[in-house]
Image (tube, grey):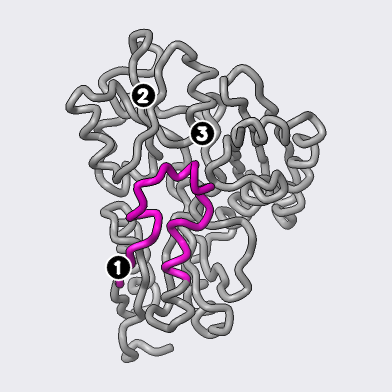
Amino acid sequence: MNRTAPPLRMGTRRSAMATAQSGMVAARLTELTGRAVELVGVTTFGDVTKANLTQLGGTGVFVSALRDKLIEGEIDFAVHSLKDLPTTPDPRVVIAAIPPRDDPRDALVGPVKLADLPPGAKVGTGSPRRVSQLRALRPDLEYVPIRGNADTRIAKVASGELQAIVLAVAGLGRLGREAEIAQVFETEEMLPAPGQGALAVECRADRADLAAFLGVLDDAPTRAAVTAERAVLNALEAGCAAPVGAYSATRGRELFLTAAVVAVDGRRAVRKSTAGSLSAPADLGRDLAAEMIAEGAGTLIGERAH
């Protein structure tokens, strides 16, 4: 790796949000290493399908095309939203870096806070995780599945088709749309998706030199936190479309982890918290998932499929 080498080719989804976050990673890598980076737009199955992502299981629909380009050598590395990555490892690739995480929480976009919406108001979200937790807070509202990019979704509020929508704070921030947030949900109210707000920088497993080079972007506390969260999801054998929320944060050498599975109707939930060593985040996540399964979490996940 040297500063006179040709630009590295970074694969990214073509959406405004994806290119914004990939551009941030590219700029940071160039700042730290002096190496130029060229963005290569890739259209994924998740971008073109009209199907609801919950029907597809969610897992990998935004990832496979980027990985194919990596394996074929058409790009050098790819940037993904970490919450889109399947939790089962792909031996062909390696996560070379997980940069510092942005705000992991969810936000309500609309004119008023959730508590101030009138009964029967329509709230748009395509996420079973969000719907389940929203129903626990406001069972009297109507939750409407929506697709499309953030701008398309926000436009449905402006037009009056929906009274509010729920999006990730991090995504709104990357698009410069924070001013439209009516309420940020604290993790006690709504647990985010495992890995939400974090990015994954991925390259081929046989490119140890490139993985080491990209490692300058890695943030150890973020990697530990999201590893614990994703271990919960993996141990629950639930895809990223399942009603599973998890959030982990580091304090000193300790990792604090909370996870929940919430029933479709929002009336029942298995929610557990734990703490452990920063050095074994995957074990912490697996152990917490085992406790949740013992309390019936698997049954609540299964209800979603029927």
Specify the segment rendered in magenta. 40-67
Quarter occupied by residue 24: bottom left
Q: Are there few (<14), some (14-19), or many (20+) residues within 10 Å of tag 1? A: some
Residue 152, placed above or below residue 27? above
The residue indicated by pointer 1 is 41
In magenta stretch: residue 59: yes
Disc number placed over residue 123 in the picture, else none = 2
How far apart are the two marked residues, 3 and 1, measured between alpha carbons?
29 Å
Q: Earlier in the sequence, mark 3 or mark 1?
A: 1
Apparent side of residue 207 relative to residue 37 in the rendered image (left or right): right
Apparent side of residue 101 relative to residue 295 in the rendered image (left or right): left
Q: Nearer the viewer, mark 3 or mark 1?
A: 3
Quarter occupied by residue 191: top right
- Note whether residue 100 is visible: no
Nearest the viewer among 189 and 3 is 189
Disc 2 residue type? Val
In magenta stretch: residue 288: no
Apparent side of residue 131 relative to residue 251 in the rendered image (left or right): left
Residue 134: give x, y in percent of width and height. Answer: 48, 23
The residue depicted at 40 percent of the width and 45 percent of the height is: 51
Q: Earlier in the sequence, mark 2 or mark 1?
A: 1
Q: Are there few (<14), some (14-19), or many (20+) residues within 10 Å of tag 2? A: many
How far apart are the two marked residues, 2 and 3, measured between alpha carbons?
13 Å
The residue depicted at 50 percent of the width and 75 percent of the height is: 203
Cβ atoms under marks 3 and 1 closer than 8 Å: no
Nearest the viewer among 151 and 210 is 151
Disc number placed over residue 128 in the picture, else none = 3
